[in-house]
Structure formats: C-alpha cells, structure tokens
Image (tube, coloured by chain):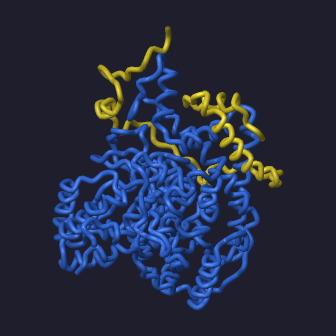
Amino acid sequence: MDLPELTLAVARDGLRRRDFSSCELTSAYLDRIQASGMLNVFSHTNPEATLAEARRADAQLADADAPDMCGIPVAIKDLFCVEGMPAQAASRILSGFCPAYESGVTERLRAAGAVLTGKVNMDEFAMGSSTEHSAFGPTVSPWRAADTDARLTPGGSSGGSAAAVAANLSLAALGTDTGGSIRQPAGFTGIVGLKPTYGRCSRWGIMAFASSLDQAGPLTKTVRDAAIVLHCIAGHDGRDSTSARHPVPAYESGLDAGIKGMTIGIPREYRIDGMPEDILAMWEDGAAMLGDAGARLVDVSLPHTRYALPAYYVIAPAEASSNLARYDGVRYGYRSPEGRDVLEMYKHTRAEGFGPEVKRRVLIGTYVLSQGFYEAYYRRAQRVRTLVRRDFETVFADGVDALLTPSTPSSAFAIGEMADEDPIKMYLNDVFTVTVNLAGLPGISVPVTLDDRKLPIGLQLIGQPWQEDRLLRIAFALETAAQFTSRPAEWWLDGAA
Amino acid sequence: MEIDKNEAARVAHLARIHVDDHELARIAKDLSAIIGFMQQLNEVDIEGVDAMTTATPMVLVQRDDTVKGGGLQKQLMDAAPVAQEGFYLVPKVVE
C-alpha cells in the first residue's frame, strides 16, 4: 500500500484495522517532507518529536474508541501557536519566538491523538494571496502548467498548507481564512478547503490578523476528510469571546444523504468581466451536476457584491494595524539595534521586522482609523458590511440552501508575476471569497476540473451560518459528480528522475 | 484622494514605522491607489444602515472574575529580546 496516496478517512480505517501503524504512516510522510525542499513548504519540523507523538498515538489506538484523528499526520500553518514549535507567522519580527501556550484548535487535535508534523509556510501574518510575502521565501506549488516549467504559486495565505496536502506531504493541514486564505489556495492546488462559520473554531492562540474576519479551518484531499477534521477542531472555547456555543454535529455521518429538494442559488454578480472561459464553463457544469443530483437551481442577486472588496480592504487593514501594534521589539521576537530612544527603537524594529505588504496594510489601516478619516472610511465600510450580509440573509430567507460560485477568478499564476503590478491586482484574487468573511458565513472550495493549461480550478459553495453539515453534504455531491482525480507530477521530489 | 509625501510621513509616524525619505514617494503612490479603490464605497446608499461590528450576531460574554492559569512569568520574559530581573529593558524613554 502506498501510504502517502491515502485519504485521511482511508488512513483512519487502516489504522483501526492494524493494516499499518501511525509510526509507519508518519514515517512515510516525514520521508516525503524531507525530500520536498524544492517546494519550500515546511518552515519547521522535528522528526524525533513527531515520531514520539506517533508512538503515543499507536498506544492510544490499541485501546478501543480512539478518536478519528488519532495517529493522523497534520501540518500546521505558522500562524498557530503550538507548544514546542517556533511560531513566526512567516515574519522576521517574530524570529526566534517560541510560544508558551497552545492554540485552542491544535489543543483539540492533540487531545484526539493527531500527529503534528510541523509548521508550514504562509504569507506574512496571513496577508497575501500567493505565499510570496514570507520571511522564509516563497512556497512553490507542486503543480506545473502544460505550457511552461515556470514555478507557480500555491495561492495564499495558507499556501504552505495547500501545497503540503496537494503534494502528499500531509494527510491534512490547518489554515486560516480572513478573506479567502483557505479557499483560494485550495482552488489553486486541486484540494478541498473549508472556512467554517465565524465563531465555529476557537481563535485562541492564533496570531490575530483581522479579528472580526479570521477563522481557522482544514485543507484536505476530500470533502469527507474536511468533515472529519472539522468535527475535531470545532466547538466552544471560553478563551475566545466570539467562540460559539452551538452544538457540533457528526458531520461525516450525513455526507451521503443526497441533496434532493435542496435549492442552490447562482449569484449573477459573480459573473465578472474578463473571467476565463474555462472558469465559466466549469461553473455551468458544476451547476448542472448539482441539478442532476436533484437540487433546484435558481438565479439570485447579491447586489452589494462589488462593494465587498473595497469594504474588506478598509476593515481588514484597520483591524490589522491595531492587532499588529503589539510587535514593537519589547516583548518578543526581533529588536532593531537602531534608535537612540524607545520611540526610534519601535520604528526601526517595525521597519526592519515587517515585510512590504504588511507595512502597506498597517499604513492603510492606520490611515483609515486616523482622526478625520474614521467616519469616512472605517465607519462607512462597516455599514456597507451590513448591506453585504443582508444580501445573503435575503436569499437564504427566500429558501436558498447554498450558493455556487467559482473559488477564484483564474487558475494559479507564476511566482513573481504580480511583483510589478498594482497591489490592487493581487487583492482581486479575493473577489469571490471576501464576501463570505464579511458576512461570517461558512464556505468551501471543491476541485472540479483542469483548465486549458492543465491547472486545477474549483468551485465555492457558500452556506447558511452554522449549517456546515448541509454545506458539506452539497460539497460531497459536487465532488462525487465532478470526479476530480488529477494529481501533480513529482518533478520536485529529491531523487526523482 | 491624493496622499502626498507629508501625509505618508504622518501616517508612518502614527504607525510607528520608520520610513526613509526616498521611500516616501512610492508609499504615497501606493496608499493613494488603495484609497482611490476605496472611493467606490461612496456610491453606496448607507442612509439608516447600522454599522456591523461583529461577524455573527452574538452577545459578548463575560468571564467570571476569578484568577485562572498564570504563573508564566519566566516563559514570557524568556521570549523578550532583552529582559533582566523580571523587567523588560528598553532604550531610555526620558533624557
């Protein structure tokens, strides 16, 4: 059996049947991680500590009733605090930082016996759509276009998490999604990415980017695997004041119940100018697949869609400028040797410690919150946010169970391709995903097909608040119909011919 | 809305980020482009619309006023770039 080819669900069942041990499974992944240097996915590994966790999981598996995640290797985005691992948010300003506490969601993974294989790369402080804005250098997608050997981005900001799963370096990975940072990289790498409802998973111990938008979630090979991971990491945590007390259903058990009689909305505002033919065709095909599975398709309107992106780029940087004020060279990480007094020390530390995109967003956020501009920008954006949310509430009240849209406006682009572009061009990557964060809804990206360059493209499903179970059921129906089985070639594997 | 070099320098000061003079023109241009993009929001009729300040409607819960956890002083101080005898050390604040 080729262990790295398994899905999480199949590996779980194999562990229970004693077909293999967690130590064998984990070793297979560690070997591949070791040989994946060309992709620059992992920023931290500790094989000895990881294997010790696998041995503990094997002991736990010997008892009956071990949790589903027991013995399963999982990679963690560098934004999460994990005890015993450095946490740097891919930023120079946190170089050398080792947290003294564990994030709420990784605590749940550990309690279930999951094996944490290491930290994976990301855009610095989760700000970006390409994993190029990282103190560790860019992560490379395992995918290559048919027409060029150019190195492609896996998307971002959870690009390391996406590349880890797409390249079979991990059975699953944790990411975070503030404006699309789980769903866009999942779309670019042909895997499943789920952003849960805001408040579903604890934000405790996750370095804050934009607190009213941030949400943790899984990146996996299949919808079933996403259901299994979500069940483990969801639930109330008293240390996060926005964590919800809603019950967490057994997501996996209802997956194959079918979608007969459900209503799927196709929002007309997502048909934007200049969208590639392949994306449009996939969208139509996906809608037809859901129709064939028994769902009713309706055209719907979300009239404030086009204002979501500018509202997001007021609100997210505003919150970021406040959250990132704590990185000042006093309590953790990097301190600049420059500066005669404390104010100059702060300024030099932040100038040298933050990368250009983080600085840009902190400056924008500071500007929109500054005296005289607060009402004109920040307050106005928050009121537009209300309208974006109302658009969704209106269609859900009309009986729509979920909405179907493309995950991204294009397939993956090349590393460096956006370097000389206007920053707004990069922000347009989030055009289909930010609405979901503004409204606090759950969303999932499902891989559907390859485009004309033989790169994966996917569809997003947007669900009602707290209805991840229904959302996953629809995603499972789409996945079943789409039959996406393409995998990237292993040109990057050390020792590969 | 055009942001000039003086305005860019003011924002950088408020954000506590050191910027060299030769960088100011580029930063002003970047900020102007992004602020320009935000101007679209002025087209929206927001009359009578409340600001959305929380992602999902919820009552902010309060914790019991009791001591929990703590005792992490050593680990926290160990993470600091410079600390001594339980204090963070910084360059002088007052001449």
| In this picture, residue A78 sits left or right of residue B95 | left
Q: Which residue is at the front of the view, A488 or A97? A: A488
Chain identifier of the blue chain = A
Relative to A334, say whether A235 is above or below. below
Compared to residue A449, the image places residue A230 above or below, namely above
> Please, is residue A254 above or below residue A150 in the view?
below
Residue drawn where x is 35% and y is 29% of the image = B81
Image quadrant in which you'd find residue A229: bottom left
Q: Residue furthest top?
A: B95
Residue at 27% x, 65% y is A494
Q: Which chain is yellow?
A: B
Decide if residue A171 is on the left or right side of residue B92: left
Task: Give residue A393's position: percent from left, percent from top.
Answer: 69, 66
Is residue A54 in sight in this rendering?
yes
Q: Quadrant of residue A162?
A: bottom left
Find residue A7 and report its image quarter: bottom left
Viewer-proximal residue among A362 and A353: A353
Q: Residue at x 55, y 69 (%)?
A: A411
The image shows residue A67 at horizontal and vertical percentages of 29, 68
Coordinates of residue A215 in the picture (x, y in percent): 50, 56
